Amino acid sequence: MSQPSLIERLGILADAAKYDASCASSGTAKRTSKGGKGVGSTEGMGICHAYAPDGRCISLLKILLTNHCVFDCHYCINRKSSNVRRARFTPQEVADLTLSFYKRNYIEGLFLSSGIVKNSSHTMEQLIETARILREEHDFRGYIHLKTIPEAEPELVHRAGLYADRVSINVELPTVAGLTRLAPDKDAGVIEGAMGDVKASIVEARDAKKRFRSAPRFAPAGQSTQMIVGADGASDAAIVDKASALYGSFGLRRVYYSAFSPIPDASAVLPLQRPPLIREHRLYQSDWLMRFYGFAPHEVRQAADEAGMLPLDIDPKLAWALKFREQFPVDVNRAPREALLRVPGLGIRAVGAILAARRQRTLRLGDVAKLTVSVAKVRPFIVAADWRPVLLTDRADLKALVAPKRTEQLELFAA
């Protein structure tokens, strides 16, 4: 059989990389080549689109080095027992593609992962070599995200962080039992050990940079991870607990959630259907509650049902508020920031605007309405100068009044 052309391999390996959600490019140091030195930039507007916290769109070339793999993870389309078309790039080819796409203004960086070929350390060396060529031979200053392999030698994982803006190590599944059953070649202890090593290197590099300007940088955009949702029987509550533990133990920038998608020739141990995509969305919302809204993990779990599943018809913040109505209504003219952040329908920016505006005047319901998409959702939970919900907050049918209208979820790839 003839070797696939470069374009054919690009199609195969770009498609194989679509299952990895952790390709956001926020948080890195700003670098450009405007001064006439180097190639690339981590700034500007820009095929994988990621969005920085300030709304900038960052376009990344998102590919695998190879989809050959010696592991046999049941949920992975690239597992060794899978009957998929295989392809492989050399590090030089990936570097050339990255530069070519960048110079055509298609991308601003690279997200590179790989199947395991030969062994973990050999594959990690190939990923590092790609980044080395870009950084050292071409002075590439764009964004690089390397998906590191926890089973590789620790020194190799450390070297990856010296070239990459961000590194990530996937925990794959939220429970040890699920990982053991569905990914027999992987070990939860090894994965978390590698994540701990990366955290230590990030902290050490930051400390060194404070003392010595010439100290080498190490993954300035931090590390992230990804969990597959719905491949095993883990509840949303278990996933929330796992995410909270990962943030606390390893200082992660992000935990990404990827809804399990059935694959061709799937193992009999996998579910026949994927979970609703809205479940993935609810987990992201719960993640934001913990990271930005001051919710503790046990409070997010309180929004779930007895089986530990978050409701699909309403967001977890509203579900929590409906369960703990004694916490409301909140006076927008007097309540502290922590209490305002718990009001359904009020986001971080809206709360900030309320705190700033009330220093100048007493706020009315109309003032709050200008800061939110749906004042009807907010009204039962707040008190303003001209508004008091009276018995509205305690109505038995409150959920029906504030819940969004149900719409049918469309299929992503429907004809």
Image (cartoon, rainbow, N blue to C red):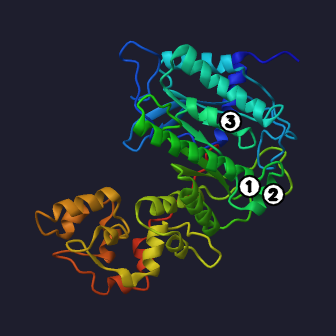
Residue 29's quadrant in the figure? top left
Q: Are marks 2 and 1 in contact (CB under 8 Å)?
A: yes
Look at label 3 and name its amino acid: Glu
The numbered mark at residue 101 is none
- Locate residue 302, reporting x and y percent: 53, 76
- On the rendered image, what quadrant is the C terminus found in? top right
**Classed neighbour count for the residue bearing mark 3: other residues with Cα under 10 Å, few (<14), some (14–19), many (≥20):** few
Q: Kindly state the secondary structure of the residue where label 2 is placed.
A: helix
- For the point 44% across and 78% down, the residue is 322
- Locate residue 242, reporting x and y percent: 62, 62
- On the rendered image, what quadrant is the N terminus found in? top right
- For the point 19% across and 60% down, the residue is 356
The foreground one among 29 and 294 is 29
Q: Are marks 1 and 3 in contact (CB under 8 Å)?
A: no
Q: Is residue 270 visible?
A: no
Whether residue 84 sits left or right of residue 107 in the image: it is right
- Locate residue 31, reporting x and y percent: 41, 27
Q: Is residue 157 visible?
A: yes
Mark 2 or 1, which is nearer the eye?
1
* Residue holding disc 2: 180
Look at label 1 and name its amino acid: Ala
Sequence-first disc among 2 and 1? 2
Residue reaching furthest to the left: 360
Residue reaching furthest to the front: 211
As measured in the structure, the alpha-carbon distance from the residue carrying label 2 to the one carrying label 1 is 8 Å
Residue 350's quadrant in the figure? bottom left
* Residue holding disc 3: 155
**Classed neighbour count for the residue bearing mark 1: other residues with Cα under 10 Å, few (<14), some (14–19), many (≥20):** some
* Residue holding disc 1: 188
